[in-house]
Amino acid sequence: MKTNSLKDSHIQLSHGSGGIQSQILITELFYNYLKGSIVGIGEDAGIGEIKNKMAVSTDGYTISPLFFSGGDIGKLAVCGSCNDVAMMGAKAKYLTASFMIEEGFLIKDLEQILKSFGNTLKECGVKLISGDTKVLPKGTLDKIFITTTAFGEVLYPNLSAFKIPEDTAILLSGDIGDHGAIIYSTREGINLQSNLQSDCALLYPMLEPLFKSNIKIYALRDATRGGIASVLNEWANTSNIGITIEESKLPIKDEVKGICELLGFEAYNLANEGMCVLSVAKEDAQKALEILHKTQKGKNAQMIGYTHNHHPKSVILQTDYGSKRFLEYPSGELLPRIC
């Protein structure tokens, strides 16, 4: 059914009233782009089944701008929660979603977001098991917020940020800082004149070959807000270990380096939405890299450092100049509304 049967070009409060306008919005817009990925259409709750242990993650998405090179809030909302359960060794199976929409929001923008949301659901084979839509008066929120919860079946158990031993290898699955750099440049109107895009993507397809191998993985973490600096410091603190990384090994695009130099950022503090940090057994590091390099998202994977028992609860950065310094937790609000 075509969405042009909607009489309004903007979201009205009546679209959230539960009446006929709500039904038109849901059936002609939401169902149109999410068909084939919805469980329990028209019921108060969806019914699903997961046979093994389950990983669950909820997150809210409030990114500004809503549309950016490489994605939008719709794609981000699916990838973000699905990636979170993947970090616990789980394959996402079901998703719930809550759309909070501001009165006056353009229906054509909502249509684009739902198209992206639905396409990403189809890409990962995840079913929308429950959803909700609310319309709030103009000025009570900024355009649109989406909250998603992913339910995943655990296929590689016992991953934990609290159980990382010393003498493990620290790997990155890909380039760092792409998402933070493109969001900031788009927000500030900086013309990069490049092909730089957000790395927003689903991570499970890249990780599945690792889960099916005999590689010992201790922990995974997608480096979103706070970047890899936040992840590494969290691991050092929760597992009471020291971590050393080599600056020369960090995979960073030239465009990202340029933005960091221009604005005084450090790439390891920038958000990512399609890469993760891995702690694996040192003897398995090379094999893990070989597997990652065969995947689309892992082709630039690098081993960047290792864990040890020196300086527990600290992250040490070996710089390109041969010196060493502590890599601290990011402080302050570097980039608000980043994801």
Image (cartoon, rainbow, N blue to C red):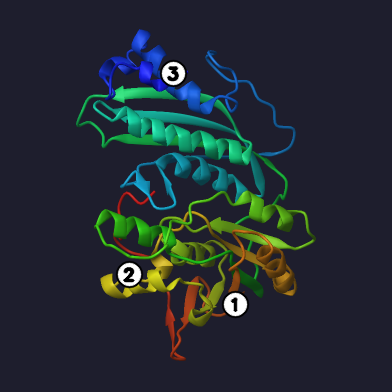
Q: Amino acid at mark 2?
A: Ile
Q: Nearest to the eye among marks 3 and 1: give it.
A: 3
Q: Residues within 10 Å of mark 2 (few under 14, many from 20)?
A: many
Residue at the (74%, 32%) spot, across then down? 51
Q: Are marks 2 and 3 in contact (CB under 8 Å)?
A: no
Q: Which residue is mark 2?
A: 259
Query: For the residue labelled by badge 1, is the local secondary structure a helix, a strand or a loop?
Result: loop
Judged left or right of residue 183, residue 178 is right
In the image, 179 versus 152, the foreground residue is 179
Q: Which residue is mark 3?
A: 28
Mark with earlier residue (2, 3): 3
Image vertical order of residue 225 relative to residue 176, above or below: above
What separation in Å lies between label 3 and label 1 (alpha carbons)?
A: 59 Å
Q: Position of residue 207 (x, y in %)?
A: 66, 55
Query: For the residue labelled by badge 3, is the local secondary structure a helix, a strand or a loop?
Result: helix
Q: Position of residue 253 (x, y in %)?
A: 45, 71
Q: Which residue is mark 1?
A: 309
Mark with earlier residue (3, 1): 3
Residue 183: tell me if it is visible: yes
What separation in Å lies between label 2 and label 3 (alpha carbons)?
A: 42 Å
Mark with earlier residue (1, 2): 2
Q: Amino acid at mark 3?
A: Glu
Q: Residues within 10 Å of mark 1 (few under 14, many from 20)?
A: some
In the image, 38 versus 241, the foreground residue is 38
Judged left or right of residue 169, residue 101 is left
In the image, 254 versus 83, the foreground residue is 254
- Write down the quadrant of residue 323 in the picture: bottom left
